[in-house]
Amino acid sequence: FEQMGIRGLEHDVVSYNATMSACEKGSQWTRTIALLSEMRARNITPDVITHNATISSCEKGQQWTLSLHVLSVMQRNSMDNIRPNMITYNASISACNKGQHWALAGHLIKAMKERGLLP
């Protein structure tokens, strides 16, 4: 990923998403958060895939509060056409369960159903 800039290639949402998904699978949640911040600093607009990879990465890293923070940002920015989907909610619910915050998980299931999404 870092080599792209050296070779004159532009970073875009697709390259960030691929890198963040790899970080998620490698349990590197801190790197995923750093990449999300870097995207914003470079004025690259994250999409639902970006947010889902970040939430899943935080969930795998036992960082339920960060997972919920990313979900909250998505919900606040839903006017940008970045709406949480079933993957978003399922990863957030899983993060709450791993953190033993079952009431929050229940709240997310309710919110998911209100948005017409099935758990």
Image: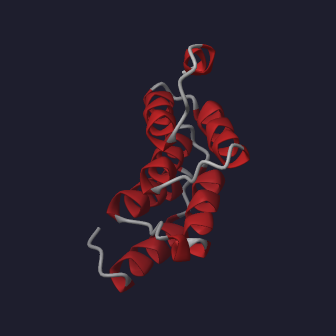
Where in the figure is residue 82, as x and y percent of width and height?
A: 48, 66
The vertical placement of 100 against 75, above or below, is above
The vertical placement of 50 against 14, above or below, is below
- Determine the residue located farthest toward the front in the rendered image: 8
Quadrant housing residue 114: bottom left
Q: Residue at x 64, y 52 (%)?
A: 66
Q: Which residue is at the front of the view, 66 or 10?
A: 10
Where in the figure is residue 103, as x and y percent of width and height?
A: 52, 72
Q: Residue at x 42, y 50 (%)?
A: 49
Q: Please state if 8 lies on the left or on the right of 60 as rendered.
A: right
Where in the figure is residue 9, as x and y percent of width and height?
A: 53, 24
Q: Please state if 77 lies on the left or on the right of 51 as rendered.
A: right
| Protein image colouring | secondary structure
Q: Residue at x 38, y 59 (%)?
A: 90
The vertical placement of 38 against 81, above or below, is above
Which image quarter holds the C terminus? bottom left
Quadrant housing residue 86: bottom left
Q: How many marks?
A: 0
The vertical placement of 56 against 20, above or below, is below
Q: Which residue is at the front of the view, 35 or 70?
A: 35
Which image quarter holds the N terminus? top right
Quadrant housing residue 115: bottom left
